[in-house]
Image (spheres, grey):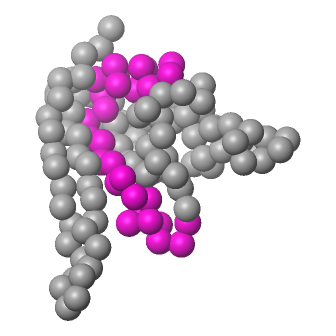
Amino acid sequence: MQFDVIIGNPPYQITGGGGGTNDSPIYDLFVRQAMRLEPRFLSMVIPSRWMAGGRGLGEFRAEFLGDRRVRTLVDYENAKDVFPTVGIGGGICYFLWIANTLECATVSTTEMARPSGRFPAIWTSSTSWYAISGP
């Protein structure tokens, strides 16, 4: 079966025996499986913790950053800017993966400036273009 587009917000973790710090990330497994299905386009919302590595995500981080099909990555430092009622430490991000591209990726970090006084919230964004080199 061939998919043109896969869009997802996969489960982020599996609860460990003691909970809390014993929880293990699983969203990387969903991202990898979706990539193996070879859709034309893939976009997912996942925690940003993978960017720092650790928690068994080092290999995923290296693979993801080395994948030249990652076209866009948008990072929200505060996950509450995207999901106001959910606490997700380390922020949240989404990406666009395009099967037939080898162009440079666009990487954005977005921070929502908190309202003060009578002024509304203001979105700020810094965007960089990176050449993500493949193997």
In the displayed structure, would residue 55 be above or below residue 127? Answer: above
Boundaries of the magenta span: 57-86
Q: How many marks?
A: 0
Q: Quadrant of the N terminus?
A: top right
> Farthest residue in the bottom direction?
118
Q: Quadrant of the C terminus?
A: top left
Question: Residue 69: x and y, percent?
Answer: 30, 28
> At 47% across and 34% down in the image, what residue appears?
50
Direction from residue 67 to residue 28 in the image, left or right: right
Q: Quadrant of residue 27?
A: top right
Q: Nearer the viewer, residue 112 or 132?
A: 112
In the displayed structure, would residue 82 be above or below residue 100? Answer: below
> At 40% across and 41% down in the image, what residue appears?
42
Q: Is residue 34 visible?
A: no
* Residue 35 is a magenta residue: no
Question: Residue 125: x and y, percent?
Answer: 18, 55
Direction from residue 70 to residue 12 in the image, left or right: right
Question: Residue 30: x and y, percent?
Answer: 58, 37
Direction from residue 111 to residue 4 in the image, left or right: right
Question: Residue 91: x and y, percent?
Answer: 43, 51
In the displayed structure, would residue 3 be above or below residue 58? Answer: below
* Residue 84 is a magenta residue: yes
> Farthest residue in the front direction?
117
